[in-house]
C-alpha cells in the first residue's frame, strides 16, 4: 500500500497512539488505492515504474492527496451516500486524478 498509517491518521485527525482502528484505516487505504488505480486505469508505484508496465505511474502528490481525501471521507462517512451529502467521493477526487487517466484506444 502506498499510503502509510501515519499519513492516514493525520488526514483523519486521529492521534498516533490511538490504535483501535488501525486495521480499518489500512483497509480503507487499500481500497482507496485500488479505487484510484481502477479510475486512472494505471498501476501506481512508490519509487519507479517497472519496465514491464509502460502505463505505470510513480505516485504524484496530487493523486496521493486524492487518495487521502477518499480515506478521510470513507472514515467519516461509512455509508455510500447520506442525507446531507449525496456523493460517493469527495468533490475534488475526480478533479485530482482524472488528468492521469489512461484511456486505451
Image (cartoon, helix red, strand yellow):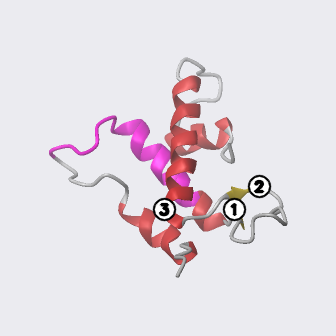
Quadrant where the image shows the N terminus: top right
SS under mark 1 = loop
The residue under the point 53% across, 66% down is 40
Q: Is residue 34 magenta?
A: no
Residue of label 1: 59
Residue drawn 49% across the image and 52% down it: 35
The segment highlighted magenta reads: 65-83
Is residue 51 toward the left or the right of residue 12 in the image?
A: right
Q: CA distance from mark 1 to mark 3?
A: 14 Å
Q: Nearer the viewer, residue 32 or 72?
A: 32
* Nearest to N terminus: mark 2 or mark 3: 3
Q: Residues within 10 Å of mark 1 (few under 14, many from 20)?
A: some
Q: Which residue is mark 2?
A: 46
How far apart are the alpha carbons under marks 2 and 3?
A: 18 Å
Q: Which residue is mark 3?
A: 39
| Vertical comparison of 53 with 77: above or below | below
Amino acid at each position: 500500500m502506498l499510503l502509510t498509517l501515519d499519513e492516514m491518521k493525520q488526514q483523519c485527525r486521529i492521534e498516533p497512539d490511538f490504535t483501535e482502528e488501525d486495521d480499518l484505516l489500512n483497509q480503507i487505504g487499500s481500497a482507496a488505492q485500488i479505487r484510484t488505480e481502477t479510475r486512472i486505469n494505471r498501476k501506481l508505484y512508490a519509487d519507479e515504474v517497472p519496465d514491464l508496465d509502460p502505463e505505470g505511474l510513480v505516485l504524484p502528490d496530487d493523486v496521493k492527496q486524492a487518495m487521502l481525501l477518499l480515506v478521510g471521507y470513507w472514515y467519516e462517512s461509512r455509508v455510500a451516500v447520506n442525507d446531507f451529502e449525496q456523493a460517493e467521493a469527495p468533490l475534488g477526487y475526480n478533479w485530482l486524478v482524472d488528468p492521469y487517466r489512461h484511456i486505451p484506444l
